Structure formats: structure tokens, C-alpha cells
Amino acid sequence: MPKTVVTGGSGKVGSWTTQVLAEAGHEVLVIDRVKPSMPLPKGARYWPVEMLNLGEVYQALAGADFVCHIGAIPDPTGFPGATTFQNNVLSTFHVFQAAVDCGVKKVIYTSSEMAYGFLDGQKVIPSYLPVDEEHPTAPQGAYGLSKKLGEDIAAMFCRNHPIAAASFRLANVRSPGNYDVYLEWRKNATESPGMLWSYVDARDVGQACLKFWESDLRGHTVFNISAADNWLDVPVEGVKKRSRYKDVPVRKGYGGSMAGWDISKARKLIGYEPRHSWRNNM
């Protein structure tokens, strides 16, 4: 039975990831500043841990096989930029330092679509659609930069230690009962592309974590993790023509209800296949 630590396990992504891993037979330790609001599944327990305290992180990771590092300030708003940057970067360094010293085999780092930098109101736009992991990154602001630097931390530790890690660039995360926002977003879909009109269900993030654990990958790998479809209820071509992305080149096969993020790498290397869509959650 794998021993798994889920940081930020009380949050939206963390709680559903805990559910998926526990159902697959993992013995899960949820660590977070706050107690989970959802009942923990069988095989899971909770510790209150401050990720900025390296000693507490070491104690939590001792004996673990797998770590899903989800704990972070989850968006650019709500805290000063310096606070967000310090929290996200330092906590990620602590997790990887403790992981290599404690003999952890694999680590998931949850990065973000914001590592690419395509924020509404910013000048940075995609070079092509759909965006794959080879696309240049240009993070805007403290949050996006903190997420990209987290990927660099993961890569550095994998270069120097026998540990495998994946950085998941997550699309806009939704969960059951949390999809109605798209009804409003569609009214402004041309002015606010909403991160390439794309999203991912928190349950599918958990599934991707499980798939990486079960894979034979070594070293550090970056993956886009998204739903297969976008959140529009009309073909994306028409919306794109009226948006600030109207002149962005399109790769062969892109259109219709497809997501703006290319997930073919995750499909090929870890067998990721999104199971959840707004179409059966609205």
C-alpha cells in the first residue's frame, strides 16, 4: 500500500485528489493549515502542518512513497504579491528538499496555466493553438512566476537526485457543484477568453496524479492537465474570430469543442484521459 502525502489536502483540488488516491488503495496523509471540510475517505488522515516550517514538512514526509504537492496560495488575488511569491516558492522548495532526504520516490507539483502568461488584459498571447508544453512561458505577476519557479525547483532536484517528478500545468479548476460560473463567463467569452476557454475537473487532477504514480517515468516532466473540451457551448472558431486571439495560428485539427491546451503528452506518457465535463455537471 503506497504511503502518500497530499499537501493542501483540505482545498478543492487536494480533497478530490485524496478521494481518488484513497479509493485506489493509497494510505493518504492530508497536510494543510486548515482542517478538511469534507469527510476524509477510509485510509486517509489529517495533520495540521505549516509548509513554511521545514521541520514540520520533514516530519510529515518521513516514510512517504509519493507526494502530491497541491498546497499553495491558489490564485493571484487575496494576498499581496510578495506574500504569494514567498509562500508558493518556499513551500515548494521545502517539499522537494524533504522529499529527497526522506527517500520519497515520486512528487507531483501542481503548477498552473498561468505559467504561460496568457492573462486577460495582458499583452502576452499564444503563438499557436492549442498550446502544448513546448510553448514559451512568460508568467505575469507574482503568482504565475511562483508557479513557473516551482517547476524549475522540481527540475533541479530531479537532475541531482534519484527522484521522479511531474509538474501539472492545471487549467481553470472546477469541481462538482462549481460549474455554473460558465453560464456568466460565456456572456463575455470574446472579451475574456478565460485562459483559452479551458478548464479541468478536480477529480481528473486526482486521476492524473494516480496515473503518474503508476507510470515508469523518471526525471522531471511537464504536463498540461485539462479537460478534453472547452467551456463554450458554441464552436470555438467563431468565438476566436471575435477575440484578441483572432490572429493566433491554429494547428491542424483544432476547433469545435476542443480545449485550448494540448493534452496529448499526458495521454501518451501517463495514460491520462479526462472523464468529467461541464456537459454532465451543469
Image (cartoon, grey):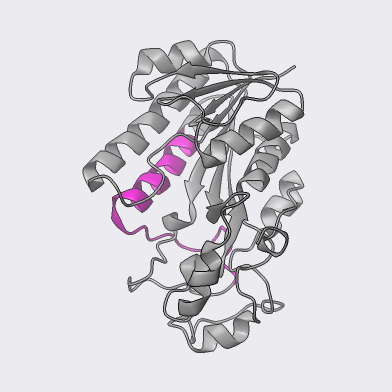
Q: Residue at x 58, y 59 (%)?
A: 179
Task: Name the quadrant containing residue 134.
Answer: bottom right
Q: Is residue 142 left or right of residue 136?
A: left
Q: Residue at x 24, y 47 (%)?
A: 81
Q: Is residue 273 left or right of residue 88?
A: right
Q: Which of 26 and 65 is in front in this view?
A: 26
State whether residue 230 is above or below residue 94.
Answer: below
Task: Name the quadrant containing residue 4.
Answer: top right
Q: Which residue is drawn at 47% across and 73% down?
A: 193
State whether residue 252 is above or below residue 85.
Answer: below
Can the viewer see residue 219? no
Q: Nearer the viewer, residue 135 or 116?
A: 116
Residue 84 horizontal/vertical position (percent): 30, 42
Q: Residue at x 65, y 34 (%)?
A: 218
Q: How many labels does the image show?
A: 0
State whether residue 261 is above or below residue 211.
Answer: below
Residue 212 horizontal/vertical position (percent): 68, 37
Residue 9 horizontal/vertical position (percent): 53, 30
Residue 143 horizontal/vertical position (percent): 34, 49
The magenta region covers 130-156
Can the viewer see residue 84? yes
Q: Quadrant of the C terminus?
A: bottom right
Q: Is residue 17 left or right of residue 97?
A: right
* Residue 124 falls within the magenta-colored stretch: no
Q: In which quarter of the image is the N terminus?
A: top right
